[in-house]
Amino acid sequence: MFERNKVDNSPAQSGIAVEITRDDGTIEKGKLLLSQSGKVLDVLNGSAQFLEIESYEGRRRLIAKATLRDIRVVPIPGAQNLQTRLREGEFDPYRVLGVEVGAGPDAVKAAYHARAKAYHPDRYANAELPQEVCDYLAIMARRINAAYDALEAPMQVKRQSQQNRQAPVYTSPAR
């Protein structure tokens, strides 16, 4: 009867990342809001006097078309770019997890849990996301897991060697 996932009844909108240059030379960055079926050119060439822009902080406002000098659509890297960078060796596990080089096991584990929770694709299963975003979330989840494995493996070897040194290799049976 009612959908719990839908909070408001406003028409669905999507945002295109843009960089707007105004006549006075100021540059604004944000998302140009479009209806789901709308296109950038339809909005720019339409009869409306204003464009609805949402800043990356989430603040929405209207900008008069007459004050615009230039609008540049900002390209967003696709999932294939992430896969290419991963194959080419541009993989820094410390940067992926957001920890300093040489961070302790507790810091690595805490960072891993925080990132894994934020990027896990199941967290957004009920959201209606574009395929590119779903691909990005899946790849980031794999990168986070790989970063944790890369940082955890040496720590695990170190713990194992310490346990082996502490445990006797052979004990004689008690008489």
Image (cartoon, helix red, strand yellow):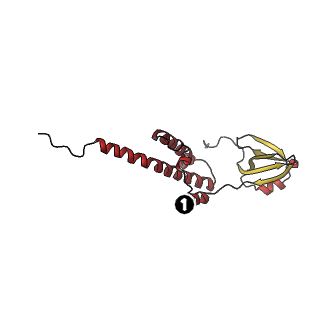
Q: Residue at x 80, y 53 (%)?
A: 71
**How many dots with numbers?**
1
Disc 1 secondary structure class:
helix
Taking 14 as reference, is 103 above or below it? above
Amino acid type, residue under disc 1 in the picture? Arg
Q: Which quadrant would residue 98 be assigned to in this image?
A: top right
Percent x, y of residue 50: 84, 47
- Which residue lies under the disc numbered 1? 87
Taking 83 as reference, is 172 above or below it? above
Q: Is residue 24 left or right of residue 157?
A: right
Screen quadrant of the C terminus: top left
Name the residue nearer the viewer: 115 or 86. Answer: 86
Q: Is residue 27 left or right of residue 131?
A: right
At label 1, counting other C-alpha atoms closer than 10 Å, the crowd grade (few under 14, some 14-19, many 20 or more) is: few
Name the residue nearer the viewer: 97 or 48. Answer: 97
Q: Is residue 102 left or right of residue 78?
A: left
Screen quadrant of the N terminus: top right
Percent x, y of residue 172: 16, 43
Q: Is residue 89 left or right of residue 55?
A: left
Name the residue nearer the viewer: 175 or 135. Answer: 175
Taking 174 as reference, is 47 above or below it? below
Q: Residue furthest left?
A: 175
Percent x, y of residue 142: 52, 53
Percent x, y of residue 132: 62, 56
